[in-house]
Image (spheres, helix red, strand yellow):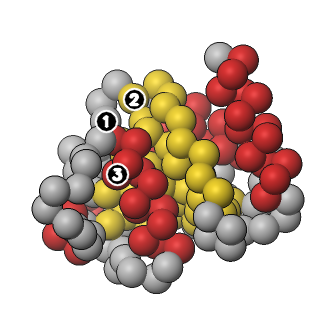
């Protein structure tokens, strides 16, 4: 845990006040998180236990300018997006069919998916889907 905290604090110190993008690959038990500084290409990936409110608190405590959080739609639904919005973050949910897939032979891991999402969003290559209200979803 100390190594992860140290890596993240070094990343935050290196990016100073530049806008950072956060890509998430969301699974039932864990979230893969990728913080990206598109200006100089710095990337800080890490994994954390799942939990909407816990992640929102963790991101709020980073101490960097988090411009946008993006994740792929799926079985997790929109609860994470709503929790992050309540915490004051700009959030986009992306349909899997709208994500550029690149080379067929490219490696695929949760960590790499999170990095790709953040990178693609920072470059303007993704179009988000609407996040329904609880009443619309229910």
Taking 99 as reference, is 52 above or below it?
Answer: above
Q: Which residue is rendered at x = 34% and y = 51% of the image?
A: 113
Q: Residue at x 66, y 44 (%)?
A: 59
Q: How many marks?
A: 3
Q: Residue at x 33, y 41 (%)?
A: 110
Mark 2 falls on what kind of element? Answer: strand
The mark closer to the camera, 3 or 2, is 3
Residue 19 lies in quadrant: bottom right
- Residue 128 position in % (x across, y down): 36, 74
Answer whether labels 3 and 2 touch (C-beta < 8 Å): no
**Viewer-proximal residue, 3 or 22?**
3
Which residue, given by chain and number where applicable, does mark 3 sit on?
113
Name the residue furthest left.
104
Dot 1 alpha-carbon crowd within 10 angstroms: few under 14, some 14 to 19, many 20 or more? some
Of residues 61 and 87, the one drawn nearer to the viewer in this rendering: 61
How far apart are the alpha carbons under marks 1 and 3?
12 Å
From where the camera sits, is residue 95 visible?
yes
On residue 30, the disc is 2
Mark 3 or mark 2: whose residue is earlier in sequence: 2
């Amino acid at each position: 845990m100390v190594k992860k905290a140290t890596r993240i604090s070094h990343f935050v110190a290196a990016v100073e006040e530049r806008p950072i993008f956060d890509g998430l690959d969301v699974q039932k038990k864990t979230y893969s998180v990728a913080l990206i500084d598109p200006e100089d290409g710095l990337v800080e990936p890490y994994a954390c236990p799942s939990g909407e409110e816990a992640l929102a608190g963790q991101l709020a405590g980073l101490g960097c300018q988090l411009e946008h959080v993006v994740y792929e739609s799926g079985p997790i639904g929109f609860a994470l997006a709503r929790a992050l919005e309540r915490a004051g973050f700009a959030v986009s949910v992306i349909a899997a069919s709208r994500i550029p897939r690149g080379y067929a032979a490219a490696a695929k891991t949760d960590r790499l998916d999170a990095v790709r999402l953040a990178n693609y969003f920072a470059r303007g290559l993704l179009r988000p889907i609407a996040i329904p209200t609880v009443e619309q979803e229910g």
